[in-house]
Amino acid sequence: MIEENLLNKTSWIIFSVVTAGLFGLLIFFSNTNSTKINVDSVNLTAVQTGNKQNGNIGDQVFGKAGSKVTLINYGDFQCPGCGSAHSTIKTVTELYKEQIQFVFRNFVLTDIHANAKAAAGAAEAAGLQGKYWEMHNKIYESQSDWENLSGTERADFFTNYAKSLKLDTTKFNTDVASSAIGDKLDYDKALGVKAGVDATPTFYLNGTKLDSDVWGDEAKLKDAINTELKKAGIELPASEK
C-alpha cells in the first residue's frame, strides 16, 4: 500500500495518435489546482450521482443499488496491493450482489504509477457505454500486461480491450480524452482525501474503515458484511446462513 502527495488536479495533455484510424490514449501531467473541487458538504457514504464537479459521471456501483449496506473501495488500477486484492473482492461482491452495493472510486497515484490514470480513464470510458465492470475486471486481471507499456502500445492495449467488449472504439477514445472523465477521476480523489485515504486499496463498510487483515481475508470480509446485513435486517445469501 502506497502513500502519495494528495489532491493533484489533472491537466490533460493530449497527443492524438492515429493508429488504424483511432485516437491513441493519453499522456498525463498534473499540477495543483484542486481548490476547484469542493466536497465539504458531500456525504461520503452516499452513492454519488452525476454533477458538474464530477463531469456528470456518478459513482460506479455493482450489486444491489440502494442497499443499506455499502462497501466502498478507493483504488488505483496499477497498485500491486489493489491487484492482489481484486480476486477476493470480486468473489465476495459477486456473492453478495443481491444484498449489498459495491462502489469503486478512483484514487490514482500519479506520482508513482505512470499508467494508472490511463487505466482509470479506460474503465470510466467503458462505463459510459455500459461496460464499466467488465473493463474494470479485465484491467485488474491483466495488470502485469499493461503496467509497463507506453505511448501507442498502451493505446492499442486498452483500445483492443474496448473492441473485445464490443464498444464503439471511436467514442471510447474520445471519452478517455474528455475533460469529463478527468473531472470524474479528480472528484473521486477529492472524496478519498476527505475520507482520510492515504493508501490504496482502502475500504469502507458502511462508513467504517476496514483493516487490511479484514479486506484481505475472504472469510473475515464476509463476516464483516454479514454483521452489517444482520444490523440492517437484510437476509444473508443462502451460503452464509
Image (spheres, rainbow, N blue to C red):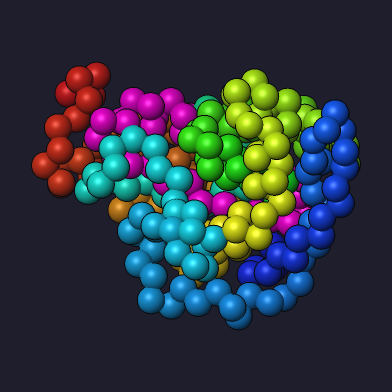
Residue 107 visible in rendering: no
Residue 203 drawn in magenta: no
Question: Is residue 170 depicted above or below 91 in this figure?
Answer: below
Q: At 58% from the left edge and 37% from the top edge, which residue is drawn?
A: 126
Q: At 65% from the left edge and 60% from the top edge, which residue is drawn?
A: 179
Residue 83 visible in rendering: yes
In the rendering, at what x and y percent does residue 191 appear? 49, 64
Residue farthest along the bottom direction in this orientation: 35
In the rendered structure, which segment of residues is drawn in magenta?
Answer: 88-116
Q: Quadrant of residue 180?
A: bottom right
In the rendering, at what x and y percent does residue 36 appear? 59, 78
Question: Is residue 236 depicted above or below 54 in this figure?
Answer: above
In the rendering, at what x and y percent does residue 26 appear? 80, 49
- Position of residue 80 in the picture relative to residue 13 (left or right): left
In the rendering, at what x and y percent does residue 75 appear? 57, 48
Residue 108 drawn in magenta: yes
Q: At 48% from the left edge and 35% from the top edge, which residue is drawn?
A: 130
Q: How many marks?
A: 0
- Position of residue 240 in the picture relative to residue 102 (left or right): left
Q: At 76% from the left edge and 49% from the top edge, which residue is drawn?
A: 113
- Position of residue 99 in the picture relative to residue 207 (left or right): left
Q: Quadrant of residue 67?
A: top left
Give the quarter of the figure containing the C terminus. top left
